[in-house]
Amino acid sequence: MTDVENKDFYVLNDVASYVDNNKKYKRPLHPDVDTIEINVDSLKSDNKTLRFSPEKINREEYSTQSYFRTGTGFSNNKTHSRKSEGKLIEERIISGQFLESVSVFDWGGDFGFYEKFRHDAEKYREVKGKPCPHVPFFSYVPQYSQMKPAQMSYYFYLRDELRSGHYPLSDLSYVLLYVYELINLGDDSDNYRDIQILCALWSAYRTVYPVLDKYLSEWVADYCLIHSVDLPSVVTPFLPQVASRSSLKEFFLEEAYKASSGDISVFTECLIAACSDYVPERSRYLTDDPSLLLKLKSIFKETVSKLIAEKSMMFSPDRRNESLVKRDAYSGSLCSYSVKKRLFVKVCSPFRSQDVRREVTEILRYCENIVRKNAGIRSRLTVDLKSEIKNIIANGSSSRSDDETYLALYDAPEGELSIEGAINLENISWDSTERLVGDIYDDGTEEEHEEEPIGTISFSDDLPSENAAHDKSTDDTSSFFDPRYNDVLLKIISANGENSPSFESLCRDAGIFPDSAASEINEYFTDVFGDIVLENMHGKYFLIEDYRDQISELLKMGGDPDETG
């Protein structure tokens, strides 16, 4: 195959054929070439070179023709056409939480693509490998015919290891080749065993080759639906990441829901990853303290559990929107058309609605606000939720918290008071005190120091007095704080109501940049209050109401935080 001047086309010179008595004979110039499949519209009239365009074709309506060389040009042998739907093979009722049924159809076409690969897979399926050194192998679409003998030997050895649950060094092309083999032999093998092998190698190599999540999140779902096998439990630990990548997220949500069995942690993780626009792990407050992230997910889990029990919001029967998802099985994989199927999956999921996605997002944001409040963080996220939903979340978070569980350890034990027990407890306390502070003293003896008479202590001339420090603080504040910032803050504090001027408009009127002003104001008040006072929400800055009175008093005092005490 060589390039031509037009880079969108290529020349096929691999096959020379001739006709004798109306029969087609092929004399391939390369042993791996069987036939030529081209788009009819791309055939050129000069009959000297055969070209095809790699542009995408409508898979629902297109036709291809096989051509062979004659003495005068090319002749047509057979036309293949893609039917709308193939023959119905099986219709199966699932009756799950999010999946109702699946219908499996033949692909509906008569194609010869990748039939040689399937033939080779059947021929090599029982070949045993022997231990041998690793041989690198790379191919965008790996096939047996592309490998050299040393690579074939290593592949057979690797395949035996994968079948026995061992996962040695492997290139991605070897892994994909075995995946293609399992897919193409799925109609004539032990599907339960093969799906276990497929998901186990997925779990073993996904961290090394993250692209496997993209491919196998689709192909594993197709395999399970076609062959009616359950998703192996080895996938459960990374179900949230898989659900967010798959175009049929209901399949993995269904598996996560079935795997809950009383604990819906995995299911709620899938909801956060696949059905929300908010990523709690990116919150600057939660990343600084991982325990806050765990509390948020705990509150969210309790909320979802209540919604499921009460069949409320997205779990209400009225929100279960039925839809029919049509998909081509094993799309993007090397798959024989005798194995390729067409799937009609009937889903009853609320999570394809943008309104439900927004609800999940807002619930997560409100859960984080509760965590921030309990942690003493004054800034809040803007949330648009109905009051009854807020009550459900608040009630779910009102159960005994981690702090209350900790304080419960110090509750007085039940029973009669004992003087002897109190004395023992005091002795234990003094022993603990001695262990904690004993290292402060060298040998337990006190050094003698000459006492200084009272009233003789004086400050060094190099140290500033208290008043000097106070004056310096005031001077630093006045020099740091641009007077225009004071005016903007005072106008914001004094303004109330919907028609109040925005921070941005006040900055523009004062001739300063809003972002620079907000940055410097927040930097100053972080040193004073330990928190920012202007929060950026949707590209605009808003004053945090909790600090309104303190800022007003501080500005009136000239910017000295000690005066506001």
Image (cartoon, helix red, strand yellow):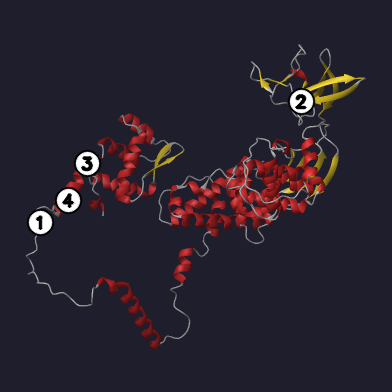
**What percent of the width, then of the height, locates residue 318?**
70, 47
Find numbered disc 2 in the image and state the secondary structure of the residue it sits on.
loop
Q: Name the mark on residue 478.
A: 3
Q: CA distance from mark 2 to mark 1?
A: 99 Å
Instruction: Tell me which label, 3 or 1, sits earlier in the chain.
Output: 1
Residue occupying the point 53% across, 63% down? 399
Instruction: Look at mark 2 in the image and give the residue it sits on.
Output: 29
Q: CA distance from mark 3 to mark 1?
A: 28 Å
Q: Nearer the viewer, residue 423 or 2?
A: 2
Q: Nearer the viewer, residue 407 or 242?
A: 242
Q: CA distance from mark 3 to mark 4?
A: 14 Å
Instruction: Tell me which label, 3 or 2, sits earlier in the chain.
Output: 2
The crowd level at tag 2 (other Cα within 10 Å; few <14, some 14-19, many 20+) is few
Instruction: Look at mark 1 in the image and give the residue it sits on.
Output: 460
Instruction: Tell me which label, 1 or 4, sits earlier in the chain.
Output: 1
**What percent of the width, then of the height, locates residue 305?**
61, 57
Callout 2 touching callout 4 (CB < 8 Å): no
Find numbered disc 3 in the image and state the secondary structure of the residue it sits on.
helix
Q: CA distance from mark 1 to mark 4?
A: 14 Å
Residue type at mark 2 is Leu
Find numbered disc 1 in the image and state the secondary structure of the residue it sits on.
loop
